[in-house]
Image (tube, rainbow, N blue to C red):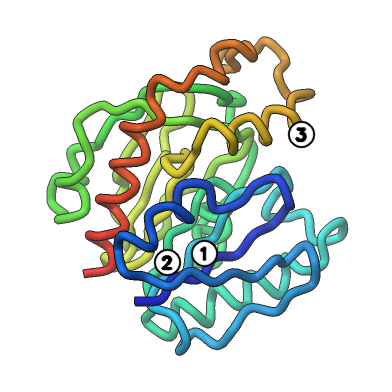
Amino acid sequence: MRIHYLQHVPFEGPAHLSSVVRPMGAELTHSLLFAGQEPPEPAVFDLLVVLGGPMGVHDEKEHSWLAGEKQYIELVLESGKRIIGICLGAQLVASVLGARVYKNRYKEIGWYPVTKTAEARSSPLGSILPGVFPAFHWHGDTFDIPSGAVHMAESAACANQCFLYEDRALGLQFHLESTADSIRLLHDNCGDELDGGGYVQTSDEILKTGHIAESNLLFERILVEILK
């Protein structure tokens, strides 16, 4: 089993994904897009994970590699491979599938509950999701649900938190892979976004670790299911 991930900035890495691959008997490889690394042919992996990042889907002038990344995600989708997009990664997958990506009404930063939709109950992957579960968020943008995809989850601040396309492309607006270290790195590099908004927690609330183990376990279960 081979898992490959695309990373957009030095401080937002694979986090818990790095810890879980060995017990799964998987090999983990990566492409650091911000450093100019080219991703491999889809034939060399079973699952592509597209990580988060502070840039937006449309910021191609500032990050020229975004255009090539979208073409690559399209190639991976056409190849029939499995994909998990996280935060920016979910927005990129949604965009490639023809959905709109735009500013959300609220910035959502911190630990907020996510609710499974009724539609999600029809899918095996949806059966893994609890009815309500805590998740770590750090985003200002959102996506429309791509045509043909299942709307899987929502939150009070953001209606479209998760989608599943053809049982093989999963978009997660939230971060189940977060660890104490990865949250600290995100906080230290993007802390200027903590503007006191209605869905923006304080530093103390953000850095609490009480939900991490639960989130990581759910992330592991999703990985196992999508790789079946």
User: Which residue type does callout 1 highlight?
Assistant: Gly
Foreground: disc 2 or disc 1: 2
The disc, 3 or 2, on the residue closer to the chain's N-terminal end is: 2
Relative to the observer, which residue lies in front, 110 or 101? 110
31 displayed left or right of 155: right
Q: Residue at x 38, y 24 (%)?
A: 211
Q: Residue at x 72, y 67 (%)?
A: 33
Q: Which residue is mark 1?
A: 98
Q: Which mark is residue 18?
A: none
Quadrant occupied by the N terminus: bottom left
Could you give the CA–CA distance between mark 3 and mark 2, rounded to whole angstroms?
27 Å
Is residue 181 positioned above or below 45 on the image? Answer: above
Is residue 113 positioned above or below 126 on the image? Answer: above
Foreground: disc 1 or disc 3: 3
Q: Which residue is mark 3?
A: 189
User: Which residue type does callout 2 highlight?
Assistant: Ile
Q: Point out residue 127 in the picture as x, y percentages from the top left corner.
A: 14, 46
Q: Point out residue 185 in the picture as x, y percentages from the top left corner.
A: 68, 35
59 displayed left or right of 76: right
Q: Which mark is residue 83?
A: 2
Q: Point out residue 214 in the picture as x, y percentages from the top left corner.
A: 31, 32
Could you give the CA–CA distance between mark 1 and mark 3, rounded to whole angstroms?
31 Å
